[in-house]
Image (spheres, helix red, strand yellow):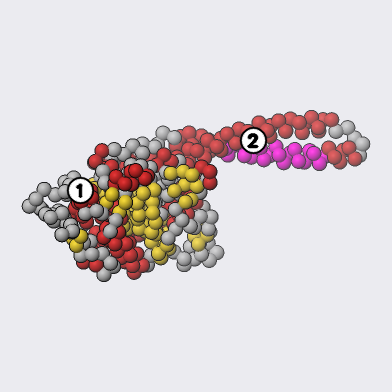
Amino acid sequence: MLDLKLIRAEPERVKAALARRGAAEQVDELLRLDARRRELLPEVEGAQSQRKSLSKEIGEAKQRGEDAEGLVARVGELKQAIESGSAELERVEARLEAIAAALPNLPDPEAPDGDSEEDAAVLREVGEPPSFDFEPRDHLEIGAALGLIDIESAAAVSGSRFAYLKGDLVLAELALVRWAIELLRGEGYEPVVPPVLVREQALYGTGFFPGDRDQIYEIPKDDLFLVGTSEVPLVALHADEILEPGALPVRYAGFSTCFRREAGAAGRDTRGIFRVHQFDKVEMVSFVEPEASSDEHERLLAIEERILAELEIPYRVVSVAAGDLGASAARKYDCEAWIPSQERYRELTSCSNTTDYQARRLNCRYRPAEGEQPRPPHTLNGTAIAVGRTLIALIENRQERDGSFTLPNTLHRWGAPEKIAPAR
């Protein structure tokens, strides 16, 4: 949530920043509602105080046997004023809260202009895409032929965009996760397996509600939701908490299954396991002091690039356009892996600096030093391993003519086979 004091103090700067995200038009209404709220509050509170005082006077007058009819009439007028003012205040606050909840974070000045994937700025390309002396297959053709990916059985059991992973591909997934967790632990991230069912406040607090509600699976009977990323329970872990001096930075490495409805997805992305409803992921989350968040963002990106380099996956890094950012992000980097069957780079991991946006919504604060006032920390998140898409990149970039593929040396000690090949 944006700082209302900042909006009051610098409305034109806020509007100019939000205009880059197509979200400036509601700022003036928010300010009008805020001004009206600040008028109504003292009026209602003053009337309530007067009513209380007059009620006391009425009681005292009656004890003395005096006529209190005028005072009673005045109390009646105040009651009507309080009811009317309170009703308007409730309407104003509800609308104010709705607008504030819907406003996205202010984009970082370094985020490029634009509102689509095509507007992202390419920062660098790393590694050479492989060249094949045969027509490369896609991951589903290879995986199905090897008995590793079963889409048809999953569709019969669960519907479209689910998959059974089998055999050595399961060992490859477990190796990826175990290796990534150990790597992150060495970088100071505490491993966590969080809950994947959360209450609405966790999704609101992390900025996924109200905007992304149609992408989230809901369990109405229990008032719970399935998370699309472990960022949600990890950031919400410190909701309504004041972290003590010296506690920051706090860093978590969460492993969880994730669920997304992927409403509206169609075409090539729905083939195989690229865009599915259920997938596993290792996620990084950081809580840092505001002055450290820019450096922390670069740190997250460096870890993501290290992972891709050690997996020998060709990739590029892009800075996401301001209008294409998620609601909570001020700046976001994507690492896109080369996918031979599509002959282009596709998003594999991302990392976002959400500044104090999530912390404000979750009422998470830290105390800079003893005796100082608490303030919101900055939160950041980044994907270490998106398992399904990482497997796609490994299968397709390391495929061989006979339909086999190899796995990088990095994963062998964690239980991944050196090569997965057709049965002889």
Relative image position of residue 335 (x, y in whole percent):
26, 53
> Of residues 327 and 190, which is closer to you in this image?
190
Residue 51, placed above or below residue 402? above
Residue at horizontal 22 percent and vertical 56 percent from the top: 394
Sequence-first tag of 1 and 2? 2
First to last magenta residue range:
36-57
Q: Is residue 116 visible?
A: yes
Relative image position of residue 280 (x, y in whole percent):
35, 54
Element at label 2? helix
Q: Residues within 10 Å of mark 1 (few under 14, many from 20)?
A: few
Whole-Å distance between the Cαs marked 1 and 2? 64 Å
Q: Residue furthest right?
A: 65
Instruction: Find residue 282 and report its image quarter.
Output: bottom left
- In the displayed structure image, the side of residue 157 where residue 372 appears, left or right: right
Residue at horizontal 91 percent and vertical 39 percent from the top: 64
Task: Identify the residue position indicated by label 1 in the image.
Answer: 141
